[in-house]
Image (spheres, grey):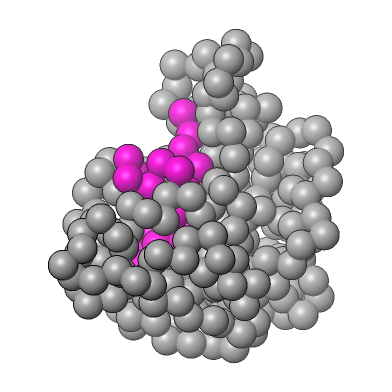
Amino acid sequence: MFYRITFLGSGTSHGVPSIGCNCETCLSKDPKDNRLRSSILLERNNKNIVIDTGPEFRIQCLRSKINHLEAVLYTHTHADHLNGIDDLRSFSDKMRTLPLYGDDKTIKEIRNRFSYIEMGTLNNTNIPNLSLNVLNPYEKVNIEDFEITPLIVNHGKLEIFGYKIFNSAYLTDCNNIPIESMKYLKNLDLLILDALQHRTHKTHFTLEEAIEVAKEIGAKQTLFTHIAHGIKHERDSKLLGENMAISYDTLSIELEE
């Protein structure tokens, strides 16, 4: 059995091009340098799960022709990963409730910031009708036929979720992977890993740091994501190690379970 991962977005919180910037990457005509906020789509058996709903979520769904959605996983509640949540009403209109999943802090903050989302009904299409569900770290769950294990990663001082999906891992927004999480990353078919820029950052891996972490994990294939405008796709792809690549929006990979 196969499943598919599609990058709905591969950019950082500002997106690329960044507003008001005239750098080489922001002026690039290479479509791989045009990045919406980071999010991925998981597809299996005609079931769709999205990880994170950033500000361009509606645009991403239209671009990738997503016409149904069975669940949403959240890594954390920063705006570039959450603030498209209201557009989930297009999917909850078609079902009784659309389930959302995240760690305890994430679910509490979603409930506080978007209290109306659990009040939606099929008769009120202006309000998304969503159910909020807490996941525990390192506790494997089956969500819509996907085998998923939430993993803790460090995003500066924050502990947030990455996700292991079958034998792949999605670790965005991190600058450290705890030893306990590393235990789950052996013999991966695919690693998707944060690689923000070249310059040191207090909450994200640089590209150079991400390359070293990817070598340590040793997945069969590594794709870097959450890219800022300091990285240019064609130029910086030449810096990568074997079986590594910089992701880009709409990139789609089919994997065996």
State the extent of the magenta-drawn residues as a range.
Answer: 34-60
Instruction: Identify the residue shown where x is 76% and y is 62%.
Output: 158
Q: Position of residue 8 (x, y in %)?
A: 40, 48
Q: Position of residue 125 (x, y in %)?
A: 21, 59
Instruction: Identify the residue shown where x is 39% and y is 82%.
Output: 143
Instruction: Identify the residue shown where x is 79% and y is 71%.
Output: 178
Q: Quadrant of residue 119?
A: bottom left
Q: Is residue 91 magenta?
A: no
Q: For this view, does 203 lie left or right of residue 47? A: right
Of 9 and 157, the residue lying toward us: 157
Residue lying farthest top? 22
Q: Is residue 226 at all visible to an observer of this figure?
A: yes
Instruction: Identify the residue shown where x is 59% and y is 88%.
Output: 139
Of 75 and 6, the residue lying toward us: 75
Which quadrant of the rendered structure holds the C terminus?
Answer: bottom left
Of 47 and 29, the residue lying toward us: 47
Which quadrant of the rendered structure holds the N terminus?
Answer: bottom left
Q: Position of residue 207 (x, y in %)?
A: 72, 41
